[in-house]
């Protein structure tokens, strides 16, 4: 996946907004934003792994905020060793044209030492929104890892994966936490992009409108109702 | 074997000395997992759980599963808030510097078994 290819695929899928959410890193966000220009809203995101191995998606108002949050996390991560890339893959940092700028040498695939509440707090401290990732999955979702949804963590929303049937029936069991439900593709490959999507009732694609929609303020909402 | 005797045999640190109701309990079943959804589904009533997770939800899950005690492996110690919740629930918490594998091995040698033993 390169920035130009991601943007082209998102546009081909008819998406108005995507979020770039590398694991424990935000180093590729600005490149995708640059590749998109005015054609597509690209949110600065990051998928953080908590100490309990819960995945938490942070969505930030700008690439700099995501990078600042990632820098704090980076201080807690180990350096990769010789075998790392053969197991976890190469961690490319790409330019807007898709050329490789460098390789990330922090072990991004590992858990951070922050517990899930501290991860949410870190995201909020950098002005971001914290979404409990793919809570329907047995592994790496907060319910799978922690048995019960951590209602005191302060999440702004929950995400369900493409495996949950769209609509009130499929999503019913995930609505009980009183948080808005978003759906996203969790794309790890180009062909995943657009496999799941969230409809927002808002003025225009972008972080500020998403924040309003998650809070159900100003006439904005998740879904088209 | 009684819980207090198991704790003595394994040299466990007692994080909840105020919880006394379980000390005489006979422990013959145990479970080891760090996935709390799995603990919720499979941990045996009246048994002991060995885990690395120190999140507050351990207490909720252990109470719901009606466990007698939780042993935290690898020198992990839950926050005071978590310990206070355990005390309120009457759940005994212990700690050990040993890893999960060795703790489970010691428990097994004392006659504490899993579901299928």
Image (tube, coloured by chain):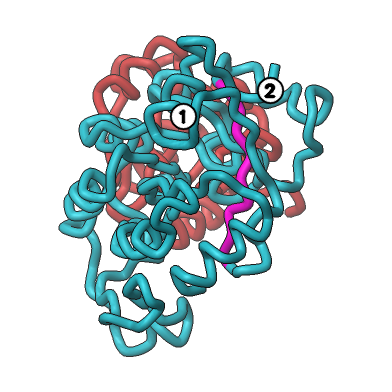
Residue A107, percent from left and from top: 31, 70
Image quarter hosting the C terminus of chain B: bottom right
Q: Which residue is mark 2?
A: A224
Residue at (25, 23) in percent of width and height: B80
Q: Is residue A185 magenta?
A: yes
Colour of chain A, in one word, is cyan
Asked if residue A134 shows in the view, the reply is yes
Residue B73, percent from left and from top: 37, 49
* Label pair 2/1, CB-CB below 8 angstroms: no
Asked if residue A48 shows in the view, the reply is no
Above or below, B35 against A193 in this view is above
Above or below, A145 against A8 in this view is above
Residue at (40, 78) in percent of width and height: A98
Tell me where the magenta segment starts and ends, as one range.
Answer: A180-188
Residue B41, percent from left and from top: 70, 36
Q: Is residue A140 magenta?
A: no
Q: Chain ID for label 1? A: A
Colour of chain B, in one word, is red
> Which secondary structure lies at badge 1?
helix
Above or below, A34 against B70 in this view is below
Q: Which mark is residue A210?
A: 1
Q: Chain ID for label 2? A: A
> Which secondary structure lies at badge 2?
loop
**The image quarter in which residue B44 lies:** top right
Above or below, A128 against A91 in this view is above
State the predominant SS element of the stretch in magenta: loop
Image quarter hosting the N terminus of chain B: top right
Q: Nearer the viewer, residue A30 or B116?
A: A30
N-terminal of the pair, mark 2 or mark 1, is 1
- Label 2 to label 1: alpha-carbon separation: 13 Å
Answer with left or right where residue A188 lies relative to residue B91: right
């Amino acid at each position: 996946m390169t920035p130009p290819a991601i943007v082209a695929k998102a546009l081909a899928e008819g998406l108005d907004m995507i979020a770039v959410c590398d694991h424990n890193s935000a180093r590729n966000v600005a490149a995708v934003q640059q590749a998109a220009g005015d054609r597509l809203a690209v949110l600065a995101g990051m998928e953080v792994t908590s100490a309990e191995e819960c995945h938490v998606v942070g969505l930030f108002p700008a690439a700099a905020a995501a990078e600042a949050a990632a820098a704090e996390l980076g201080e807690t991560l180990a350096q990769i060793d010789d075998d790392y890339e053969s197991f976890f893959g190469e961690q490319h940092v790409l330019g807007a044209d898709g050329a490789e700028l460098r390789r990330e040498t922090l072990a991004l695939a590992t858990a951070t030492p922050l517990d899930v509440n501290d991860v949410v707090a870190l995201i909020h401290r950098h002005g971001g929104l914290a979404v409990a990732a793919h809570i329907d999955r047995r592994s790496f979702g907060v319910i799978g890892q922690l048995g019960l949804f951590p209602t005191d963590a302060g999440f702004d929303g929950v995400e369900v994966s493409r495996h949950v049937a769209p609509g009130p029936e499929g999503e019913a069991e995930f609505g009980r936490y009183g948080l808005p439900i978003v759906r996203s593709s969790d794309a790890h490959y180009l062909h995943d992009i657009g496999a799941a999507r969230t409809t927002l009732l808002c003025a225009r694609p972008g972080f500020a409108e998403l924040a309003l929609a998650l809070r159900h303020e100003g006439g904005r909402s998740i879904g088209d109702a | 074997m009684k819980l207090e005797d198991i704790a003595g045999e394994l040299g466990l640190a007692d994080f909840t000395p105020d919880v006394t109701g379980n000390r005489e309990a006979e422990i013959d079943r145990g479970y080891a997992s760090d996935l709390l959804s799995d603990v919720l589904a499979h941990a045996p009533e009246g048994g002991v759980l060995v885990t690395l997770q120190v999140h507050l939800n351990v207490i909720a899950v252990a109470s719901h599963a009606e466990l007698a005690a939780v042993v935290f492996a690898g020198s992990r110690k839950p926050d005071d808030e978590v310990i206070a919740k355990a005390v309120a629930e009457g759940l005994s918490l212990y700690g050990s510097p040993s890893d999960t594998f060795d703790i489970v091995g010691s428990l097994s040698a004392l006659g504490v078994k899993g579901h299928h033993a």
